[in-house]
Amino acid sequence: MTSSPLHVDANMPNRTFDQGSTGLLVIDPYNDFISDGGKLWNRIRAIAEANQCIAHMLEVVSAARTAGIRVFYALHRRYRPGDYETWRYIAPVQKAAWTSKVFEKGTWGGEIRREFEPQPADVVASEHWCSSAFANTDLDVLLKRHGIQRIIVIGLIAHTCVEASVRFAAELGYDVTVVKDATADYSDEEMHAALDINLPNYATAVVTAREVLEALASVVPA
Amino acid sequence: MTSSPLHVDANMPNRTFDQGSTGLLVIDPYNDFISDGGKLWNRIRAIAEANQCIAHMLEVVSAARTAGIRVFYALHRRYRPGDYETWRYIAPVQKAAWTSKVFEKGTWGGEIRREFEPQPADVVASEHWCSSAFANTDLDVLLKRHGIQRIIVIGLIAHTCVEASVRFAAELGYDVTVVKDATADYSDEEMHAALDINLPNYATAVVTAREVLEALASVVPA
Amino acid sequence: MTSSPLHVDANMPNRTFDQGSTGLLVIDPYNDFISDGGKLWNRIRAIAEANQCIAHMLEVVSAARTAGIRVFYALHRRYRPGDYETWRYIAPVQKAAWTSKVFEKGTWGGEIRREFEPQPADVVASEHWCSSAFANTDLDVLLKRHGIQRIIVIGLIAHTCVEASVRFAAELGYDVTVVKDATADYSDEEMHAALDINLPNYATAVVTAREVLEALASVVPA
Amino acid sequence: MTSSPLHVDANMPNRTFDQGSTGLLVIDPYNDFISDGGKLWNRIRAIAEANQCIAHMLEVVSAARTAGIRVFYALHRRYRPGDYETWRYIAPVQKAAWTSKVFEKGTWGGEIRREFEPQPADVVASEHWCSSAFANTDLDVLLKRHGIQRIIVIGLIAHTCVEASVRFAAELGYDVTVVKDATADYSDEEMHAALDINLPNYATAVVTAREVLEALASVVPA
């Protein structure tokens, strides 16, 4: 029987990725979140500027492409009129999205920030309605169809979409690495709840952009 | 076209449940969690005693049965030798379960605490491997087959299985009510992260046992 | 405990639908399938004309709207360049779609036939990559969010997308009625395999358009 | 960017498997199906004896173990009293299982036929309620946790559980090989519908036991 040793890395210096089975997941890089003038930018600005979130996100995306690690986009439902009026029940986080019309389709806020525009070889999953990039989308099958078993996660925001996607990824059987300074949140308390309390239960590693860039610099070819 | 008014209750006094579409979800009432001598009891004891978690859980289960609200059990994978040795990747929360052999099959710790033993009309879902009662189980289909669209959630522990199950329930389209003093956690900080930071995004209501008991006392018959 | 009588209708005359829990699922009413000049029209034309498939589909959609039964659209992935080139594995049915560029985005063939254009109150699910309208889409959550537990199914084609969607619906816990002369197929043999061999295992009723129109004429208001 | 060539094998002689990513799925090898005296044996006996189904199943299981290909078991819900009485809706195939009490828990019919008894290194998924081995079970996550992306499928019966599992596997992103003389059915017509009409759309290869044994004899080590 194949040995299948358990790949649980205790520390990042020994954490390595191979092209064939690793993907980068970029969550919700919308103007409304991370561009000056976006509806939610002022709420995450303090943390995003303090940890250089956007610069780190760009560095990780660029390094992944250079390393031959495929990039997957997970995008929240772009608000369209009529989305929720007929629902019998709605989750509070969805009610808030409805009220704020965040990521409205056809508006600048609902567009991906220019530097993060998907490239031809990237894969864009169908939009998610709540917080998890996996729930009710084609992300799982698209990862499988590309042979991906491990994901590196960056994007917005830590305690909602990032945490939800990491929790689902672990439940579905993926190995997860979260880049802690390539995400942001509304408050230190929420950021702390995600990065320090919950994500360490589901992500095998919660690392810095510097650490993941080092690992991406020595990716194992497929 | 049917009106389908949106049932979002701003406050609990007006929150009502009907038999036909509401179920009670009881998460992991194992001896290892909530009985004296259980492997994890000492870690949750301070909070569970302070908020009378177990007494409240019992009251809610009893009231649900009296009200004709069906009870569903969500149970964590009972540890069996060989469960994880061959896995290629494992989430840290699963690694911890493996190390501690928590809820071990065939042992007292892996049995449901006596007062919570499922009754004939209850429904017991298949065991979950990680934290969400929905992931990789038959809970969703069993709820659907019983016509359930709304769930009341109690059990252990707040920031792992309870939060994961509530997040999944919301993603899958269920209306969720969490009973905040019928759950517990290892620390105040983790309890706070679940009850105050994350659950209010996904649960329509986070209420006390007293409030849910009042609502259960006036359930709408099917 | 609520009685929850089992609603299994032995024959259609007694089969009734209520607004609150029933939805109509319209599968792939693309020009490529059901319009003169569509890429696949000539392959299904013989059967579709013999059983008046398109006329029946229109009658059922119209009757559903009149009855206050909400209409849900399940649409196959519209082909886009680059969809499959990077996949490691692909199912034969997907390989065929890739080769034929069926339902190509931005072309007439990938548009919904005019008479079936979704109306404001309708719900359009995200596109499916293979055959099931439920797999990797938001159909399940959109049905749940509208309180739907029973679906009436029409559309194309019987032994692939219709059968796949009915099989998945049953697995997920929905009650299913298939309208057998509001679907079509490439050959009598494939139509027979779907309607007579497989669907009766998963659909509670396989009925004629006339029968479903009668049932829709006496829908129970919400 | 990694090349990710598309592995679609036109013919079996070139179809190869590697240990690390291939698993064998054995569906419902219960006494009730394949043992003399089983409740359904007389209904499948003619076909199962004509194509030497059981001998082929045993040969494939044995060859997989020898080749280091991990064996996964997909088992139908063993009937227990109370399983269905409270369901609001039920699929006809489930109603039949309820009536016949097939695979009854605690009886010989609900036991795995002795020669197919799972071995220590095998993985047994949770029971499925309808036909698909993937629906409402942990099969997908167990395959992922073992790195499996391709499955070889054998077992019972062709047009229900085998076809359903193959359809779901393809939808979920797995590469599928079906062994056509290691399955059986109630009638030639149903066997034909599965093997010749439907499975070729979802399984990349539908092969003989001889062909798969040859492929297993030259498995690529992990």
Image (spheres, coloured by chain):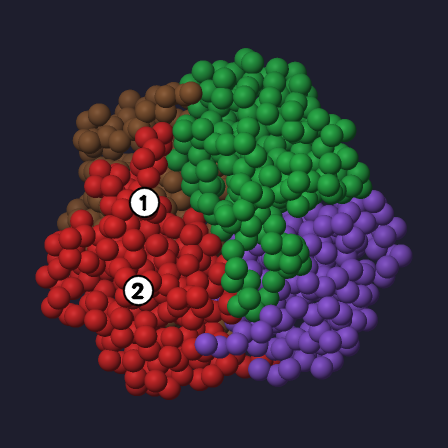
Chain colours: A purple, B green, C brown, D red
The quarter of the rendered structure image containing the N terminus of chain C is top left
Answer with the quarter of the image where residue C219 lies.
top left
Write down the residue under mark 1: D105
- Which chain contains the residue that carries disc 1? D
In percent of the image, x 55 and y 25: which residue is there? Answer: B61
Asked whether disc 1 touches disc 2, contact meaning CB atoms under 8 Å apart, the reply is: no
**Depicted B155 relative to depicted A151: above or below:** above
What type is the residue that disc 1 sits on? Answer: Lys
Residue C66 is situated, as x and y percent measured from the top left of the image, at 35, 28
Give the Cα separation between the discs numbered 1 and 2: 17 Å
Task: Assign a secondary structure to mark 2.
Answer: helix
**Depicted D7 relative to depicted A103: above or below:** below
**Depicted B164 relative to depicted D73: above or below:** above
Circle 2 crowding by C-alpha within 10 Å: few under 14, some 14–19, many from 20: some
In percent of the image, x 88 and y 51: which residue is there? Answer: A46
Write down the residue under mark 2: D116
B128 with respect to C134 (left or right) = right
In percent of the image, x 59 and y 32: which residue is there? Answer: B153
- Which chain contains the residue that carries disc 2? D
In percent of the image, x 28 and y 26: which residue is there? Answer: C16
Confirm whether residue A207 shows in the render.
yes
